[in-house]
Image: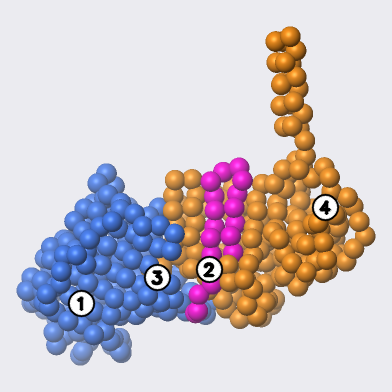
Amino acid sequence: MYPLMRSWILLCCCFVALNASAQTGFKPVANLELFKQQFMKTAQSTNTIKSDFVQEKNLSMLSEKIVSKGKFWFKKENKVRMEYSAPSYYLMVINGKSFRIKDAKSDRNISTSGSKLFEQISKVTADCVQGNVLNNKDFNTKVLENAQYYQVQMTPVAKGLKDFFNSIDLLVEKKDLAVVKIIMHERSGDDTNISFTQRELNVPISDEIFALK
Amino acid sequence: MRSLRLNSLVALLLFSSCTSAYRSLQKTEGDAACIKRFQPKINQTVLYSTQVDILQHHLSGLLLFKPMDDSSMRVVFASEMGLKFFDFEFGKDGSFIKHYMLPKMDKKAVVKTLRKDFEMVLMRQDPATAEVFMNGAERYTAFKLKKGKIYYITSKDCSELVRVENGSRRKPVVEVFLTHYTNGVPDSIFVQHKKVKFNISSQRVEK
């Protein structure tokens, strides 16, 4: 169950962000190849990311929202730390093929080997880091644009992620190709949005940040 | 002599295995409605940081209780990262609707168990249908289920909730502890199943 619960979070490892605003007036991107090249170039020049994040879980049937906050670290090639501080503490670290999960009751490592879903996630992670996410065959991908943003609409086609998400949208700011918002549309009808603030790129981050238990 | 000892041991084991934990309950007249003071007064959405240990699995997330305009209560559990596990509705009249359950968890037995666990927590039973028993220094307010009973076990004077218990005919199956009430809402909820490893531990957090 754990890998399934956390699947989408791994997508974050390639996402850099600012606050998102208007998301209207999108149409198919005029020059897809240019976008791909620029997106890949930006990803390849990003070695570390440090930022705060705000996550909003919208419970569609209840008109209710759960807001969570925390800090995010990324270090090339495959190190991610996501630490929630509110409304409760929760830590998730990815270090290569291992996870560390810490909550109020437990702190443990989980190996990714032997899980097909983990393989998909690892691939998405690697593709994001290398800027190849648009070529990932686990998703059908469309790219739209308006004056300010690109919108990458990723529809899972592979079993696993498909069981949980109808689609995952990335909102990419045109001026610096930073992903400003991730919107995960669950099959349940809910969606979860995550926005990053106070983004710092290519600052030194110690490996200790990504230490397993 | 040896066979006599063996027979005695077998008889003792048989006897003890058949003894009911509820054998010493003494039926009494009493106000069953007194337990209502322990019913969580959830007048607005409350949130709990929650960990679930089920067999070899460990789940963690946020448990949300939301009172609805029609007096029903919605109970939603989602992971910290937003993935929803379940969404249940508990009606004022005892009805139950499963609005959503993560397909991988959507088993009849799991839903039935969770329904019963949260019914014990929400205390929505009608006191008029209860029986009251005494057991030493403890008072048992019992509600009949199709199988077994739910007991709200309090101090003799009903001033303190000791635990909530779902019992079969002979022994406790589930125990629920609601503690550290703040403004009528428990800060801590702990559900412990006795037959299988299945525990739910919740601590209230600010929304």
Residue stretch in magenta: B189-207
Q: Are the residues tagged 1 and 2 within 8 Å (C-beta)? A: no
Circle 3 sits on which residue? A89
Residue A88, placed above or below residue B53: below
In the rendered image, residue A120, in percent from the top left (x then y), is placed at 24, 55
In the rendered image, residue B183, in percent from the top left (x then y), is placed at 65, 80
In the rendered image, residue B30, in percent from the top left (x then y), is placed at 90, 63
In the rendered image, residue B177, in percent from the top left (x then y), is placed at 64, 60
- Give the chain letter for orange: B
Q: Identify the hue of chain A.
A: blue
Q: Are the residues tagged 4 and 1 within 8 Å (C-beta)? A: no
Q: Are the residues tagged 1 and 3 within 8 Å (C-beta)? A: no
Query: Residue, x 82% and y 42% (percent of image)?
Result: B23
Circle 1 sits on which residue? A50
Q: Are the residues tagged 3 and 2 within 8 Å (C-beta)? A: no
Q: Do the residues at pointers 4 and 1 share their chain?
A: no
The quadrant where residue A149 appears: bottom left
Categorize mark 4 by other alpha carbons within 10 Å: few (<14), some (14-19), many (20+).
few
Identify which amino acid the numbered label 1 is placed on. Lys
Dot 1: element: strand
Q: Nearer the viewer, residue B31 or A97?
A: B31
In space, the residues marked 1 and 3 are separated at their CA atoms by 18 Å
Categorize mark 3 by other alpha carbons within 10 Å: few (<14), some (14-19), many (20+).
some
Label 2 marks a residue whose chain is B
Circle 2 sits on which residue? B203
**Front label number (4 vs 3):** 4
